[in-house]
Image: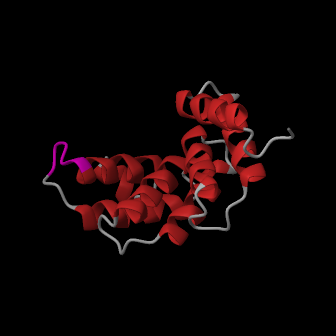
Amino acid sequence: FGQAAKQGHPEAQFSLGFAYAAGIGVAQDQDAAVRLYKKAAEQGDSKAQNGLAICYIEGTGVTHSIDDAACYFRLSADQGSDQAQCWLGFLREHGKGANRNLVETVRMYRAAAAQKSCWGLARLGVCLEKGRGVAQ
């Protein structure tokens, strides 16, 4: 992946970033992972946007920032990532990274559930059962 990542291929940048984040085949290096995720995310790579958002959630290789995480999840969700849709729903449900908005929460969970996301289906079920973000 190294050569392709140096040539600017976002998929390779994400994959190499993931390898650095997990220490797979290379020494674990969170700073390198974040640099590569950022390069790929700037080119619109949805997986890299998710990876970078999770780094911001965890404060791994970057300063912890729910707001920055939400921005990267939004970019990825807009491309149809069910993982990002679930994260955005969760953040909105709990008023993190944006104001609490249960209608938006349900919209995100529905989008993820439509893609057969287990997390999206489960969270949507909870919202429907409890009447959160849906007409009573």
Q: Is residue 21 something that shows in the picture?
A: yes
Q: Residue 73: where, in percent of width, then height?
A: 57, 56
Residue 8 visible, this angle: no
Quadrant hosting residue 55: bottom left
Q: Give above or below for 51 relative to 42.
A: above
Boundaries of the magenta span: 22-26
From the viewer's perspective, is 40 left or right of 2? right
Q: Residue furthest top?
A: 116
Of the pair 17 and 131, the residue shown nearer to us: 131
Q: With respect to residue 78, does 24 lie above or below? A: above
Q: Can you tell which quarter of the image residue 116 is in?
A: top right
Q: Is residue 14 left or right of residue 24?
A: right
Q: Which residue is at 64% across, 57% downward?
A: 92
Closer to us: 106 or 53: 106
Q: Position of residue 54 (x, y in %)?
A: 42, 56
How is this picture coloured?
secondary structure
- Magenta: main secondary structure: loop
* Residue 61 image point, x, y percent: 29, 68
Residue found at the far left of this picture? 27
Give the percent coordinates (x, y) of residue 40: 48, 58
Residue at the image position 34 percent from the left and 67 percent from the top = 59
In this rendering, position of residue 56 left or right of residue 95: left
Question: Would you say 26 lies left or right of 119 here?
Answer: left
User: Based on the displayed image, in which of its 4 quarters is residue 126 positioned?
Assistant: top right
Please say whether residue 65 is one of the residues in the magenta stretch. no
Does 25 lie within the magenta span?
A: yes
The quarter of the picture where the C terminus appears is top right
In the image, what residue occupies the spot 31% across and 59% down? 33
